[in-house]
Amino acid sequence: MQRFVQLALDFLGGPAPEVPRPAPAPAPPRVVAPPALPMGQVFQPAAWHHPRANRMLRLGSCDVAYEFKRGKRRTIGLSVSTDGLSVSAPRWTPVGEVEALLHDKSAWVLEKLQSARERAGEMAQARIVWADGAEFDYLGGRLRLLLDPTHTFTQVGAVFEPAEAPGTPATLRLGLAHSAKEAQVRDAAQAWLMKQAKALFAERLDHFAPQLGVRYSKLRLSSAGTRWGSASADGSIRLNWRLIHLKLEMVDYVVVHELSHLHHMDHSPQFWDVVASVLPDHAERRRALREAAVPLDE
């Protein structure tokens, strides 16, 4: 009996039967995180600094270093450009009054500074690298440079070839070696662009002057960085040659704007009535001109 009990205990206490292991669960698919955004896209800039800043003020959560000038003027003037904020004030205006105005206009100032920074980015993207194959805007279309030292030119300097199909760029052939430096390519291309600009501007001035009942005396090209055109009381007109990069409707707006100044040398309601007499949609054209990204650091 003792042996039977011992056998029974041996059986019950023996090693447990092996149970097959379950297959390991498949690993979850690897998730690749998107690249981190640049800090400038996540946080608003904490500071704005004009290159000629001589005063600093805290506006909202931003430190704004601005250019402060005094002069012969009656009111405080605020100007925002890609450089930053400039403030002009009469000689007698206390600094506290200037800063009070900036605090009162802080939302407007910060909005304009942000817009100016975005504008500077657009301008940087629009910058032309003058080399074989470079593309840029020309009268609302695209134009590609082609360096062709073997081409026999019937015209001096460059030859324009229209686009072969819709949506493709036109070609400007330049008689330069492929090893030409950027300055050489730029000078040759810009000489052609300026020639086209002057011819186009003269044609558009001659088209609109009779409609406005004015006569201009002289056309000159401008390379100004901040003005598209100007008019003088003697009838001379200056137009920025870089308008050649834009659509014709924007060129026409500037032409009509400057010719209208031969009636009114200001921006009074009477002036805008003259502009509207030939361009009823002048406000839309003006807005498009402001938003256009034309490279000015060529």
Image (spheres, helix red, strand yellow):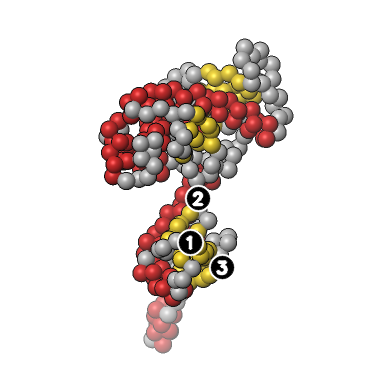
Give the labeled residue for mark 2: 120
Q: CA distance from mark 1 to mark 2?
A: 31 Å
101 or 64: nearer the viewer: 101
Give the labeled residue for mark 1: 72
173 or 254: nearer the viewer: 254
The crowding category of the residue bearing disc 1, from other C-alpha atoms within 10 Å (few below 14, some 14 to 19, many at least 20), is few
Percent of width and height locating residue 4: 40, 82
As shown in the figure, which amino acid type bears the numbered disc 2?
Ala
Q: Please indicate whether residue 180 sits to the left or right of residue 130 in the image.
A: right
230 or 6: nearer the viewer: 230
Percent of width and height locating residue 251: 42, 32
N-terminal-most mark, 1 or 2: 1
As shown in the figure, which amino acid type bears the numbered disc 3?
Asn
Name which quarter of the figure residue 10 lies in.
bottom left
Q: Secondary structure at mark 2?
A: helix
Q: CA distance from mark 3 to mark 1?
A: 19 Å
Give the labeled residue for mark 3: 54
Name which quarter of the figure residue 75 lies in.
bottom left
Q: Residue at x 67, y 35 (%)?
A: 182
Does the image show residue 266?
yes
Nearer mark to the viewer, of 3 and 1: 1
Does the image show residue 60?
no
Q: Secondary structure at mark 3?
A: loop
N-terminal-most mark, 3 or 1: 3
As shown in the figure, which amino acid type bears the numbered disc 1?
Lys
